[in-house]
Amino acid sequence: MDRTSTVIVPDLVGQAVDIANEEATDVGLVLSGGDPDGPSLRARTWPGLFWVTAQDPLPGTVVSRGSSVQISFREDGETRSDVAAQTGGPLPSLEMHADAEDHGPANSLDD
């Protein structure tokens, strides 16, 4: 393979899908999210905030420029299946967050 026609796959896991897409595009790769006959990645992740949870090929792999990186993603706020939900017990108190703090006149619009 010619060096100018290859790129190193970046680590996209943990990034927002739109940021991962920009990074992939910047190095010459195409991000895909599943079924090539289904809706586009953009249609499946907009509007909203989605996070990359897995990718193939793995980071550090050398591939041809223009290759596809397939990702799995999860919408922000979706419950993780490997984390047990807390049940029972007292609810956290919001009382300590309810008191206004005095930040002085620096934020005043009347100055």
Image: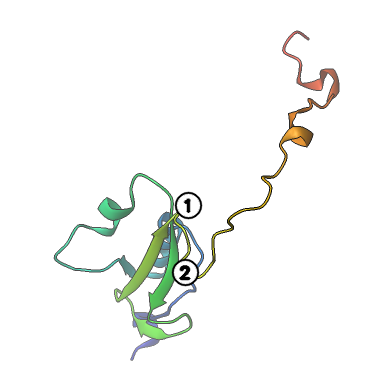
Circle nearer the N terminus (2, 1): 2
Which SS class for mark 1? loop
Q: Residue at x 69, y 47 (%)?
A: 90
**Percent x, y of residue 2:** 35, 88
Check the image and report above or below for 46 versus 105. below
Q: Is residue 42 left or right of residue 38?
A: right
Q: Is residue 106 left or right of residue 61?
A: right
Q: Residue at x 26, y 69 (%)?
A: 34
Q: Residues within 10 Å of mark 2 (few under 14, many from 20)?
A: many
Foreground residue, 100 or 6? 100
Mark in front: 2 vs 1:
1
Residue bearing mark 2: 12
**Percent x, y of residue 82:** 50, 70
**What mark, if any, has residue 77 been given in the picture?**
1
Q: Residues within 10 Å of mark 1 (few under 14, many from 20)?
A: few
Foreground residue, 5 or 90? 90
Q: Quadrant of the N terminus?
A: bottom left
Foreground residue, 33 or 60? 33
Q: Residue furthest front?
A: 88
Given the image, on which type of amino acid does mark 1 rest?
Gly
Report the label total: 2
Residue 29 visible in the current orientation: no
Given the image, on which type of amino acid does mark 2 rest?
Leu
**Percent x, y of residue 52:** 43, 65
Check the image and report above or below for 103 versus 90. above
Q: Residue furthest left?
A: 37
Which SS class for mark 2? loop
Q: Residue at x 70, y 44 (%)?
A: 92
